[in-house]
Image: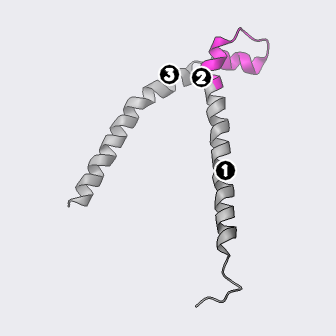
């Protein structure tokens, strides 16, 4: 049996988990907005004199990456589903 001094309180564990959850949601949101700017919004803006923004506007890699990744994702999800069904009924 554990002594009361070594166990962590449920409120501190919950608070820590909530803090990590907010951290990951924030980081994910920042990356999503950055990708959205690089893939879509920067193409709609007028040409810029800034070297970084100009290179993002002229780059077409990420505009094609996501649509071409979707069929591969569908196949991967299908194979995952099939493998789980075979594992469950084996």
Q: Quadrant of the C terminus?
A: bottom left
Res. 58 in view: no
Relative to 70, say whether 17 is above or below: below
Please tell me the numbered disc located at residue 39: 2
Which element carries disc 2, helix, strand or loop?
A: helix
Task: Indicate which label's residue lies in the foreground, 3 or 2.
Answer: 2
Q: Which residues are magenta?
A: 37-57
Coordinates of residue 53 in the picture (x, y in percent): 73, 19
Looking at the image, is 41 positioned above or below residue 19? above
**At 69% across and 18% down in the image, what residue appears?**
55
On screen, residue 68 versus residue 88, left or right, reads right
**First in residue order: circle 1 vs circle 3:** 1
Q: In the rendered image, which residue does mark 1 sit on? A: 22
Question: Residue at label 3?
Answer: 64
- Mark 3 secondary-structure assignment: helix
Upstream in sequence: badge 1 or badge 2? 1
Q: Residue at x 61, y 26 (%)?
A: 36
**Of marks 3 and 2, which one's residue comes earlier in the chain?**
2
Identify the secondary structure beneath mark 1: helix
């Amino acid at each position: 049996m554990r002594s009361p001094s070594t166990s962590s309180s449920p409120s501190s564990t919950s608070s820590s988990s909530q803090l990590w959850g907010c951290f990951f949601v924030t980081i994910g949101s920042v990356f999503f907005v950055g990708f959205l700017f690089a893939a879509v919004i920067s193409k709609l803006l007028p040409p810029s004199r800034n070297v970084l923004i100009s290179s993002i506007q002229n780059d077409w890699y990420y505009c094609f990456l996501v649509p071409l990744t979707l069929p591969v994702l569908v196949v991967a999800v299908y194979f995952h589903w099939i493998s789980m069904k075979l594992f469950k009924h084996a």
